[in-house]
Image (cartoon, grey):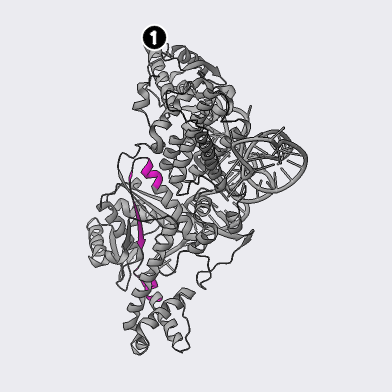
RNA sequence: GGGCGAUUAGCUCAGUUGGAUAGAGCGCUGGUCUCCGGAACCAGAGGCCGUGGGUUCAAGUCCCACAUCGCCUACCA
């Protein structure tokens, strides 16, 4: 059948919605031409899928939106609009006016099936779009200090960042993943000192750990490695002179471990950016001079302050301490400036929710540097509550008792871990139960979705064995898919590109998992009620076409989540 | 004290940016297996959307006040 031009113009949008929007636009125009409606600025027309079949397939509230401008009763406007619709292609069964003035569209039987042709045509690109128009965006996430292995708390940020990046790439942004290494400052000195202390302990000294030092087992291991490599010669050197060696050794070993753990978790960065680099080429100094020229910096006592209150922060912030040392904030501003200088139009930071007070400050910095407020976006990720069989697992970073990312991936697997971290909006608290995530049961949503995928693969396998080929566009009798569950499946499939775009627009990756659960549920229900493979060749063909579309969406969506798509389970 | 965020079914949480009769999972009760995979499905019970005002054709959603809870409130990173 012939495709309508609108399918191509607005291909990334759901085809049917666009058709209806176009019909409404023309109807409004002709209503004004015929003086049935006063001339008004064309409003943005919304068409939505209905929840209740009694309301048709799609509905628009445009008559109610127009009511205030046009100064007419919404139902009266709806009547004018519905009568003005010229459905040349015969898409519509009927249009009804309902409730306070909704226009309910009933799609002609079989028309919806043609929407699946887009899925078949686009294949693994289905769900993608060009919302981002190739704009460059950077996503900075994890960015944990290299003072210890990643733990469960970092894991959530890692998944949110990684999936967010996938989503943005799918909607047409050029995405760059970056990890900011806080390898300057006190903590690094403490790290080196901690390893040195363990080193001396291994050589028989009794040591006491001061405040701020790290006591995890990994510190002891690093000390042992250094002892093996260098022997006891560091014992006789001055601590101040030898600590940097210990620091560098520990930091780079830990960072390598972090990279490896992330890789096993399916997270790969384009760049690990070192904070030290900002000092190396005087980036922080340059930054401060730039801000000084713009009069955002003032001196009070011996310290330098940044006037963040000029952009709505509640108080000004120190950028250079009385002792002459720049603060972490100063380096972070320099880093963000560098991001924009490197050509990113949009910069997304993913932070722990306990840093939310930091947002006004960073936002002020970005604006002071002359960039749009919107150019920096921050996604906050709430704490993870780690449980085992419903009981909290004790964790304390200071004592070194924590469950590492590595252990979680080992225990529950990458797929379950990743999926579970996206089961809530990122700024809401999340319980993560190790036993539950491991369990292969209906309590574990990742299997529910993967199972749908495996089931369809199984159907296609059997079809192939029986010599039944899945039909392609044009070979399908569109009118055969008319069961309510089939219509429901088709509509849900057509929602996918919008879901991806919605997730990108709002920076809410969890929308994908909720969508997937919906889709899988409708499929499972359909599967239990109806046979795909039957003696009826035409019907089998049509259903194979439908089920293949479901498979494509499951595959594309799971890939965005970084979750595997098993053909057998 | 100030700032930010939350409050929706017994529990954990969604709610597509203001739309029609508020949803899902778990748990609970009762069902489905001669079948393309039961890691599945079906049915049922369960709600003052924290409270009180306001905005309008329409409020879980926007505005104000209050209550309760959490987080932030560094010349740390």
Q: Which portion, as a residue range, is magenta?
A: A166-190
Q: Is residue A29 left or right of residue A534?
A: left
Residue A469: % across, % down: 47, 30
Q: Is residue A425 above or below residue A205?
A: above
Q: Which residue is mark 1?
A: A34
Look at the image and tell me whether residue A72 can be seen.
no
Residue B65: % across, % down: 56, 46
Residue A81: image x %, image y %? Answer: 46, 15
User: Which is more toward the observer, A77 or A431?
Assistant: A431
Magenta region includes residue A440: no
Label 1: how many Cα within 10 Å (few below 14, some 14–19, many 20+): few
Out of A566 and A278, give the one closest to the viewer.
A566
Residue A492 in the image, given as x and y percentages of width and height: 51, 32
Q: Tell me how many marks there are.
A: 1
Q: Nearer the viewer, residue A523 or A354?
A: A523
Q: Quadrant of residue B22?
A: top right
Q: Is residue A179 magenta?
A: yes
A563 vs A239: above or below:
above
Image side of residue B66 versus residue A293, left or right: right
Query: Could you tell me which secondary element the residue under label 1 belongs to?
Result: loop
The one nearer the camera, A472 or A146, is: A472
Which residue is pictured at 42% across the width and 59% down the height?
A262
Chain of the residue where label 1 is placed in the rendered structure: A
Q: Is residue A183 visible?
A: yes
Check the image and name the residue furthest to the top: A34
Tell me if A268 is positioned left or right of A388 in this view.
left
Figure quadrant of the N terminus of chain A: top left
Q: Residue at x 40, y 46 (%)?
A: A166
């Amino acid at each position: 059948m012939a495709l309508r031009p609108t399918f191509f113009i607005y291909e990334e949008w759901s085809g049917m919605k666009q058709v209806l929007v176009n019909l409404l636009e023309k109807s409004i125009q002709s209503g004004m031409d015929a003086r049935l409606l006063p001339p008004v600025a064309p409003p943005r027309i919304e068409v939505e899928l209905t929840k209740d079949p009694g309301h048709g397939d799609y509905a628009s509230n445009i008559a109610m939106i127009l009511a205030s401008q046009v100064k007419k009763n919404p139902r009266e406007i709806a009547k004018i609009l519905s009568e003005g619709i010229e459905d040349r292609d015969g898409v519509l069964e009927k249009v009804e006016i309902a409730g306070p003035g909704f226009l309910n569209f009933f799609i002609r039987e079989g028309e919806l099936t043609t929407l699946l042709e887009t899925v078949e045509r686009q294949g693994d690109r289905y769900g993608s779009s060009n919302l981002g128009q190739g704009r460059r965006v950077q996503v900075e996430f994890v960015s944990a200090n290299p003072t210890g292995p990643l733990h469960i708390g970092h894991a959530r940020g890692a998944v949110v960042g990684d999936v967010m990046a996938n989503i943005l790439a799918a909607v047409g942004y050029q995405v760059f993943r970056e990890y900011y290494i806080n390898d300057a400052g006190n903590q690094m000195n403490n790290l080196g000192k901690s390893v040195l202390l363990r080193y001396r302990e291994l050589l028989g000294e009794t040591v006491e750990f001061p405040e701020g030092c790290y006591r995890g087992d990994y510190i002891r291991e690093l000390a042992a490695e250094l002892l093996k490599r260098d022997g006891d010669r560091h014992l006789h050197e001055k601590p101040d002179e030898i600590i940097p060696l210990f620091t560098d050794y520990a930091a780079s070993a830990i960072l390598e471990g972090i990279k490896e753990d992330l890789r096993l978790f399916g997270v790969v960065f384009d760049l690990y950016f070192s904070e030290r680099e900002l000092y190396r080429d005087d980036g922080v100094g340059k930054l401060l001079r730039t801000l000084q020229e713009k009069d955002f910096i003032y001196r009070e006592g011996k310290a330098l302050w940044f006037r963040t209150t000029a952009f709505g922060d509640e108080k000004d912030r120190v950028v250079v301490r009385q002792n002459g040392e720049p603060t972490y904030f100063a380096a972070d501003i320099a880093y963000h400036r560098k991001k924009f200088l490197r050509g990113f139009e949009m910069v997304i930071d993913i932070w722990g929710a306990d840093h939310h007070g930091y947002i006004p400050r960073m936002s002020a910095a970005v604006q002071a540097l002359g960039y749009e407020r919107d150019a920096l976006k921050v996604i906050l990720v709430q704490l993870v509550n780690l449980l085992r069989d419903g009981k909290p697992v004790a964790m304390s970073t200071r004592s070194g008792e924590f469950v590492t990312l590595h252990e979680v991936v080992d225990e529950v697997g990458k797929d379950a871990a990743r999926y579970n971290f996206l089961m809530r909006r990122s700024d809401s608290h999340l319980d993560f139960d190790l036993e539950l995530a491991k369990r292969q049961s209906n309590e574990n949503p990742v299997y529910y979705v993967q199972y749908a995928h495996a089931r369809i693969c199984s159907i296609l396998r059997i079809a192939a064995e029986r010599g039944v080929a899945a039909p392609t566009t044009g070979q399908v009798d569109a009118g055969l898919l008319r069961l309510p569950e089939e219509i429901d499946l088709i509509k849900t499939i057509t929602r996918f590109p919008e879901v991806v775009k919605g997730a990108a627009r709002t920076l809410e990756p969890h929308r994908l998992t909720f969508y997937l659960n919906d889709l899988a549920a409708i499929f499972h229900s359909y599967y239990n009620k109806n046979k795909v493979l039957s003696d009826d060749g035409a019907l089998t063909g049509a259903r194979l076409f439908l089920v293949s579309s479901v498979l494509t969406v499951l595959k594309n969506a799971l890939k965005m989540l970084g979750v595997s798509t098993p053909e057998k389970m």
